[in-house]
């Protein structure tokens, strides 16, 4: 296949991926629950020029710690409108992954057609396709990570070396999940040592330097968190229940469904081949990252979904190596045409087992966004309550309280620098399941709660059992219920 | 020789800057020069000593005295509090020069110079010499005794004796170092002489004075690294580059058994003893210097990365220093607290309740008794702070004869209370049993009307 044709096809894959994602994203004008934290940051950059590090609404007033590069990047496009920029830019970054996937696959296989498979696979990983409405920093981190891997594969070239350094620098400034890449690179060096493969001194120097730099930079950013939480800061001060729940619903077949059966099977075959048959250095780089993702998932240092996304992309790229091996083998047999039929079969199977589930999951994710009724209730709160009111809601609804209602919440998904995170989480969760009024009021009084926001979307409860007229005024009674707390326990 | 003197002068100048900077900034902000409750406790003890008072009136017990308090007392008498800042500066310079010359015994001059530079920038150096405590004097004496011991001079004995009566931990750790060296070099006579005189003087001194030093404490990572809030702690960055420096000499470990064994032993001891951290810091400074020179001399495949790496190390070291200095500059006591306590000084004799962090300041600046540290007092203090029950609270205050309550901004912002009107704060504002005697931005003093 000619280079220009391959280029056009890659561009086509990119456009298909981008338009598919954006089309699904624009099916709703809303975002996922967690995305509203990002949108507040982008909004604040647009109006004040800086992110909201000192937040008066979250937890009633607290400091956020994070590198702001991603938010500045999205905010740069706010001339499109914040909502549009938040829909388009993360999906654009996610879609650009198909280009770097092609480059990596071509470097490994030196076969344009097969590399296009890798490009296509990486665009339609079901669990990754599910993120169309997440304004997530991982859209940037993922892209940068694989660009770094590509440049490291070609590190002997001066331009690629400088680009690797530049992208590593940016990724360190973007998010603490750079450690997933760094651990992957260190494991890569270890694998080379074990397999007695040549270690390029440039690679070694870059990897060791970026390890140092990332540790130092993140230490500076999260110093306050280290002082507050000690070494447990690496678990982000998450309450135990949330950490435990990471793998609570995990089923093997479900995970394979999320990743796509073709990348899983062919990816694992590639790992087997590289470990036991032909040792290929560039594939070890991917395997290093694969092992790093598994390690961090096992230690619960990254979110389950994020870990699976990384695994999905890596397996998609590794599967291309298997395809190349099988294709080359079939070409040598007495039925060389079967090689093309094999490619066709893989493509069709991929369409059925990954593309279709991708669209299914993406459309299902539209159900995991706030409903009109919730937004209406939150807007009611904004218009009908005093500005320094405190509203208690489920942990996943915390960011909505801040964004739509512009009121203080008691709990949300950012637990860093919160001293009593575990206690607060237990108290808030129990507020929605308690039967005893006095106990509920005692807990609500601890946090000076004025309003209870009950949507019924999270947890098993269909109503609050202790809300009587003596102490609770039902001020908003639609699908969502909002109660005003009249009593206090001193 | 001239180059060596120039390098040493350069180091001394740098050390002076680093030592004096916190003092200058605190002076500029109108805060007392010295920080930390322990300093003010020792100052009070030393002032009593200069008046030959051995009984602590505020604590109803004998003063806890070491040789350090006598030295402190001597300098206070002759220099006064205003010029006392010269003392830690001079001790710091002497310690630095001793460390440099000790380094010359074992390392090339280049490595010794860089080790001394790392030592100057370490948080422990700033802790020791931007203040004045038992360890400040002990480090200086200890380094002098080790230097003289290495030079096989009998003058090591008096310095070692002074070290032993200043700090038992320094005495023990010095013994361990000298013991290792003596067996390594097969020179036991001088070691045995040091040991004999050290033990005898220790026994004699502490026969007459209370033993007050905690030698073994529980391990806590919060008390190990300055990044986690340790007052006497190692810099995490130093620890990291020191560890890498250790790996870089591991291949040549044959000639370095003594050195490596000592490092390992001091690492284990540092987990349970603060003074061992000070000694470990010496070793980390050496290892960091070895690592830095390794990086400089190495042939790099990517020259830019060499520059970035060296820049990163320099930035990391400077940041560690800057962050710790900042911590020190913002430490108590501040001018607002001192003003409040000076006001309290004019009040009649009384017992003052506050957070235990403020006890030493209360005793020194206002010459008042405090609720002393004991398990029982700890619980009572907690109960008083948390309780909103007037009857219970007044009963406890009466029982402990507390007349004044000192509240600082820090106590209201999470140290004791998280919200206004919480616990005792509610009673103070709403009960006629309490009247506010003093109020500023940072400090409130309430009088308890029995």
Image: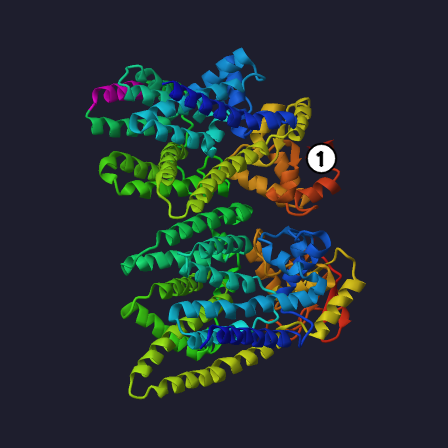
Whole-percent x, y for residue A371 in the image: 69, 74
Q: Main secondary structure of the magenta part?
A: helix
What segment carries the magenta color? B187-200
- The quadrant of the image that shows the N terminus of chain B is top left
Please provide percent x and percent y for residue A100.
49, 67
User: Which is nearer the eye, B156 or A351?
Assistant: A351
Does residue B194 belong to the magenta stretch? Answer: yes
Where does residue A434 sit, x and y in percent of width and height? 62, 67
Is B251 magenta? The answer is no
Q: Quadrant of residue A483?
A: bottom right
- Pinpoint residue A465: horizontal percent, then vertical percent: 66, 71
Residue lying at 54% horizontally and 33% vertically, measured from the top left = B325
Q: Residue furthest right?
A: A384
- Residue at coordinates 64% horizontally, 68% vertically from top-left? A88
Q: Judge the density around disc 1: few (<14), some (14-19), many (≥20) Cα neighbours within 10 Å.
A: few
Q: Which coloring applies here?
A: rainbow
Residue at coordinates 76% horizontally, 61% vertically from top-left? A486
* Residue B194 placement, left or right of A108: left
Q: Which residue is mark 1?
A: B441
Nearer to the camera, A433 or A71: A71
Left of A354 or right of it: where is A326?
left
User: Circle 1 — which element?
Assistant: loop
- What is the count of numbered marks? 1
Give the residue at the far top of this rendering.
Answer: B78
Side of B61 where A70 appears, left or right: right
Q: Is residue B229 visible?
A: yes
């Amino acid at each position: 296949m000619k280079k220009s044709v391959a280029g056009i096809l890659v561009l086509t894959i990119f456009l298909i991926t981008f338009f598919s994602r954006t089309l699904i994203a624009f099916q709703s004008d809303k975002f996922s629950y967690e995305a509203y934290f990002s949108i507040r940051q982008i909004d604040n950059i647009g109006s004040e020029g800086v992110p909201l590090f000192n937040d008066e609404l979250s937890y009633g007033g607290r400091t956020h710690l994070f590198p702001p590069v991603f938010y500045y990047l999205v905010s740069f496009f706010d001339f499109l409108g914040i909502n549009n920029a938040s829909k388009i830019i993360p999906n654009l970054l996610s879609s650009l992954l198909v280009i770097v996937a092609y480059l990596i696959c071509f470097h490994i296989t030196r076969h344009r057609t097969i590399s296009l498979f890798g490009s296509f696979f990486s665009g339609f990983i079901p669990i990754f396709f599910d993120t169309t409405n997440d304004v997530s920093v991982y859209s940037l981190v993922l892209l940068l990570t694989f660009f770094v891997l590509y440049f490291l594969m070609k590190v002997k070239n001066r331009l690629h070396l400088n680009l690797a350094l530049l992208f590593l620098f940016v990724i360190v400034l973007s998010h603490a999940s750079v450690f997933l890449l760094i651990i992957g690179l260190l494991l890569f060096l270890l694998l080379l040592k074990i397999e007695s493969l040549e270690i390029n001194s440039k690679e070694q120097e870059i990897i060791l330097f970026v390890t140092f730099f990332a540790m130092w930079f993140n230490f500076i950013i999260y110093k306050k968190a280290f002082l507050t939480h000690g070494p447990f800061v690496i678990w982000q001060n998450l309450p135990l229940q949330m950490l435990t729940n990471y793998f609570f619903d995990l089923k093997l077949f479900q995970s394979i469904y999320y990743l796509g059966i073709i990348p899983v099977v062919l990816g694992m075959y590639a790992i087997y081949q590289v470990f036991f048959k032909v040792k290929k250095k560039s594939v070890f780089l991917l395997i290093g990252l694969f092992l790093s993702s598994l390690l961090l998932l096992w230690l619960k240092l990254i979110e389950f979904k994020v870990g699976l996304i990384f695994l999905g992309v890596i397996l998609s790229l590794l599967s291309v190596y298997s395809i190349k091996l099988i294709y080359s083998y079939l070409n040598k047999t007495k039925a060389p045409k079967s090689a093309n039929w094999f490619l066709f079969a893989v493509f069709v199977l991929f369409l059925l087992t990954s593309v279709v589930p991708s669209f299914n999951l993406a459309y299902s994710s539209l159900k995991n966004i706030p409903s009109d009724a919730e937004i209406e209730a939150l807007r009611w709160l904004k218009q009908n309550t005093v500005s320094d009111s405190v509203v208690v809601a489920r942990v996943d609804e915390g960011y909505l309280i801040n964004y739509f209602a512009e009121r203080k919440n008691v709990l949300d998904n950012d637990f860093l620098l919160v001293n009593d995170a575990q206690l607060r989480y237990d108290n808030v969760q129990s507020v929605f399941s308690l039967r005893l009024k006095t106990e509920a009021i005692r807990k609500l009084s601890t946090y000076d709660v004025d309003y209870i926001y009950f949507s019924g979307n999270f947890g098993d409860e269909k109503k609050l059992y202790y809300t009587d007229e003596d102490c609770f005024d039902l001020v908003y009674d639609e699908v969502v219920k909002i109660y005003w707390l009249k009593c206090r326990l001193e | 020789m001239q180059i060596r003197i120039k390098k040493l002068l350069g180091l001394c100048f740098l050390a002076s800057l680093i030592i004096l900077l916190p003092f200058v900034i605190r002076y500029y902000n109108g805060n007392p020069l010295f920080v930390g409750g322990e300093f003010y406790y020792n100052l009070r003890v030393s002032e009593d000593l200069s008046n030959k008072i051995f009984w602590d009136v505020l604590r109803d017990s004998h003063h806890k005295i070491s040789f350090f308090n006598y030295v402190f007392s001597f300098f206070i008498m002759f220099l006064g509090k205003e010029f006392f800042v010269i003392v830690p500066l001079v001790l710091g310079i002497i310690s630095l020069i001793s460390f440099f010359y000790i380094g010359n015994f074992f390392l090339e001059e280049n490595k010794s110079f860089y080790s001394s530079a790392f030592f100057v920038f370490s948080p422990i150096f700033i802790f020791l010499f931007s203040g004045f405590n038992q360890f400040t004097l002990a480090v200086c004496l200890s380094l002098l005794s080790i230097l003289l011991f290495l030079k096989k001079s009998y003058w090591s004995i008096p310095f070692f004796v002074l070290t032993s009566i200043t700090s038992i931990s320094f005495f023990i750790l010095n013994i361990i170092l000298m013991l290792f060296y003596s067996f390594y070099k097969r020179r036991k006579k001088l070691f045995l002489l040091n040991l004999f005189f050290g033990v005898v003087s220790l026994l004699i001194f502490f026969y007459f004075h209370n033993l007050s030093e905690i030698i073994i404490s529980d391990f806590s990572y919060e008390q190990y690294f300055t990044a986690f809030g340790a007052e006497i702690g190692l810099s995490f960055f130093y620890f990291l580059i020191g560890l890498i420096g250790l790996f870089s000499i591991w291949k040549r470990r044959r000639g370095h058994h003594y050195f490596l064994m000592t490092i390992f032993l001091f690492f284990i001891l540092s987990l349970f003893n603060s003074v061992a951290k000070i000694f470990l810091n010496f070793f980390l400074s050496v290892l960091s210097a070895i690592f830095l020179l390794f990086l400089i001399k190495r042939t790099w495949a990517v020259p830019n990365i060499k520059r970035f790496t060296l820049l990163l190390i320099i930035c990391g070291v400077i940041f560690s220093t800057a962050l710790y200095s900042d911590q020190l500059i913002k430490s108590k006591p501040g001018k607002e607290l001192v003003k409040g306590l000076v006001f309290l000084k004019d009040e009649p004799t009384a017992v003052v309740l506050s957070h235990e962090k403020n006890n030493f300041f209360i005793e020194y600046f206002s010459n008042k008794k405090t609720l002393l540290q004991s398990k029982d007092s700890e619980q009572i203090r907690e109960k008083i702070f948390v309780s909103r029950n007037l009857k219970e609270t007044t009963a406890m205050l009466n029982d402990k004869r507390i007349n004044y309550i000192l509240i600082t901004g820090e106590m209201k912002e999470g140290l004791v209370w998280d919200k206004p009107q919480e616990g005792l704060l509610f009673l103070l504002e709403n009960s006629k049993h309490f009247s506010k005697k003093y109020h500023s931005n940072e400090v409130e003093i309430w009088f308890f009307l029995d």
